[in-house]
Image (tube, grey):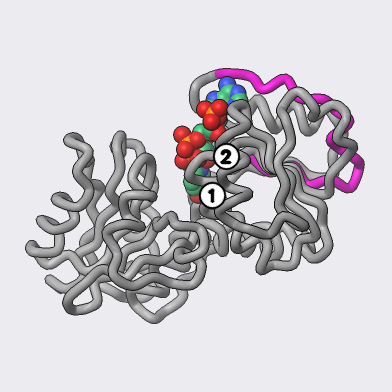
Amino acid sequence: PLSNQLAVFGHPIAHSKSPRIHQAFGHQLGIDLRYQAIDVVDGNLAAAALRFQQMGGSGANVTLPFKQDAYKLCRSLSANATRTQVVNTLHWRGDHWFGDNTDGPGLVRDISERHRQDLRARRVLILGAGGAVQGILSALLDAGVDTITLANRSPAKADALCDLIGEPARVKSLYWQDLADAGHFDLVLNGTSAGVQGASLSLPFSLLTPRTLAYDLSYGPAATDFLAWAKAGQCWLAVDGLGMLVEQAALAFALWFGQTPDSEAVYQNLRTTP
Ligand code: NDP
């Protein structure tokens, strides 16, 4: 049992649902595990990860604001993490941390399997250009989307993500003030933290059609404002990021234990008992 020591690193971390999700996965599969939330108060992820590993820690999730730091910590990386340069899952491989990013694949699974939306040839608009958006770009491209348009309040950050991905024909940036003239999209993703801060985005309805999937990466009250806008604009479906949260966790669990949990049961449980 000592080897099944897991954790999530972040700051703040008190309200993380990850311990509950992973305990439920372990329970399902009969795997005895201990999963703790570690608040990296001093901002030093490397030191916190070292202490955790010396105490027997073998795997961890990493959340805001340490996903870039986690990337730097790893001596080996998945293809996805190599391309996005952000890591949300750590796995101790005997003498070093291996890093993966399951946020993007988790989002793709939620959209294509739970919401049954084919991502191939879709025109995607992403609002925001922070760590979460950086982490999902590669998986969306791999899923076959046609183009990704990135609009961020601070345009330099969107430009930097376009440069990082390096596919100018498929990933472009757009000034926020030009959203009203940008036409409509098949998928509109809110990757900003505006909702978490209680701010409103004031977006034009012209971004939506009756076939558009509007998706907020955040969940709970933080997603309310964006989802209300999308419903008022009569999109096809407006959903929050709870499914992505559960799917990224299921993929991390599979990396650590080689077994895939039943994510739907845990998703339904979180929906009915937040
Ligand atoms: P960051 O702090 O890295 O980035 C925040 C982004 O939001 C920036 O692009 C910022 O723009 C933008 N922003 C903030 N406030 C406003 C505003 N009032 N108007 C317009 N843009 C704004 O955060 P993350 O990328 O890590 O996280 C973003 C969201 O994604 C969070 O809500 C988080 O909960 C969610 N998330 C969900 C996951 C899931 O599993 N469902 C996984 C990971 C994240 P600027 O650059 O101009 O400051």
Label 2 lies in ligand 1 vicinity (Cβ under 8 Å): yes
Say which label, 2 or 1, has the lower sequence index. 2
Q: Give how far across and how far down residue 41 sits, in percent.
A: 19, 35
The residue labelled by disc 1 is 134
Q: Residue at x 76, y 49 (%)?
A: 124
Which corner quadrant holds the N terminus? Answer: bottom left
Give neighbour class at mark 2: few <14, some 14-19, many 20+ (Cα, 10 Å).
Answer: many
User: Residue at position x 58%, y 46% from top?
Assistant: 241
> What type is the residue that disc 2 sits on?
Ala
Pointer 2 with pointer 1, Cβ within 8 A = yes
Could you tell me which residue is drawn at 40 percent across and 58 percent down? 87
The amino acid type found where label 1 is placed reads: Gln
Q: What element carries label 1?
A: helix
Q: In this view, does 144 lie above or below 50?
A: below
The residue closer to the viewer here, 133 or 13, is: 133
- Stretch in magenta: 199-216
Q: Report x, y in % for residue 212.
A: 84, 45
- In this picture, residue 136 sits left or right of residue 230: left
| Mark 1 lies within 8 Å of ligand 1 (Cβ measured) | yes
Residues 161 and 227: in front is 161
Whether 73 is among the magenta residues is no
Q: Along the line of sight, which residue is nearer the eye, 160 or 131?
A: 160
